[in-house]
Amino acid sequence: MRHLLDILDLTPEEIGQLIDTACDIIADPDKYAEKCRRRKLATLFFEPSTRTRLSFEAAMYELGGSVLGFSSSSSSSTSKGESVSDTIKVVSCYADIIAMRHPKEGAPMVASMVSGVPIINAGDGGHNHPTQTLADLLTIYREKGTFENLTIGLCGDLKFGRTVHSLINAMSRYSGVKFVLISPDELKLPDYVTNNVLIKNNIPYEETTDLIGAMPKLDILYMTRVQRERFFNEQDYIRLKDSYILTPDKLENAKSDLCIMHPLPRVNEISVAVDNDPRACYFKQVLNGKYMRMALILKLLEVE
């Protein structure tokens, strides 16, 4: 039985296979409409979510399966004091696969140790978000046709941004990749990611606070919001929340084939005026996420 807790649980070859499956689903969705008939996905979301939860549910329904679960911890027995382990043991009796989001780092790993069915980490605190990374990778592949020789700008909250951490882990395995880390000093990439991934693997990177200055060299710009829920005090959040706002004028010196990405939700870090720019790919990411979650469900359930 396989779980997906971290994007590194998948080899580059397996990611390639998932992308092939996702592309086949896009080309011929009817072929997959009954692949998960009589299978059940449990979505256990101990933390708020719109895209990830609905994407998993849409993925399972489009595979012919069904969905059960909850969308907040207050509507589950954890509000009565039930442990994560006990919740997982119970839900394993009802479902064939579980997608789980939790505010505490490592909670999906704890779940995987007691679960009788595959666990998918749908986000654990500021740590990891591997299925968002799968959506990101399919978007990059469909827009660029390759994962190699790309300069990737990561902008905004790099400290708490679990999507950023997962994407760096994933893209660091491909040759010729460079990172430009754009953030205020208070929200810089954590040392454990810098040291254990970038420096350890000799991945070229630079740190800057200047988005406009970095723009001309970027093949991909990955914007992130400053996450209010990760801050310990409101004053720090208010001071940093508008550090970077992408507007059309800031794209004047960008490459004509720049791929602008964002894991969403956005607050105001990308102006709505950018939405009509052909380089804006963040809503494509949303759709790509559904296809990659469909492919992942098939893989973990070992459906041919």
Image (cartoon, rainbow, N blue to C red):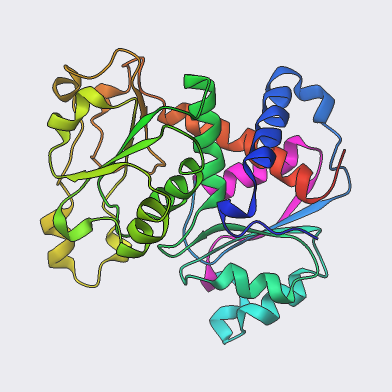
Residue in the foreground of this view, choosing between 40 and 240: 240
Please tell me whether residue 61 belongs to the stretch shown in magenta: yes
Q: Position of residue 222 (x, y in %)?
A: 34, 37
Which quarter of the image is occupied by the C terminus?
top right
**Residue 98 drawn above or below residue 14:** below
Q: Position of residue 53 (x, y in %)?
A: 57, 50
Compared across the picture, whether 217 is left or right of 161 comes to: left
Compared across the picture, whether 96 is left or right of 129 comes to: right
Residue in the foreground of this view, choosing between 297 and 228: 297
Magenta region, residue range = 51-74
Which quarter of the image is occupied by the N terminus?
bottom right
Give the quadrant of residue 20.
top right
What residue do we see at 50% from left, 30% from top? Answer: 147
| Residue at the far bottom in the pictured view | 81
What residue do we see at 32% from left, 23% from top? Answer: 275
**Residue 161 drawn above or below residue 126:** above
**Residue 241 drawn above or below residue 5:** above
Residue in the foreground of this view, choosing between 65 and 208: 208
Answer whether residue 11 is visible to the viewer in this image: yes
What residue do we see at 53% from left, 26% from top? Answer: 141
Q: Position of residue 111 (x, y in %)?
A: 66, 72
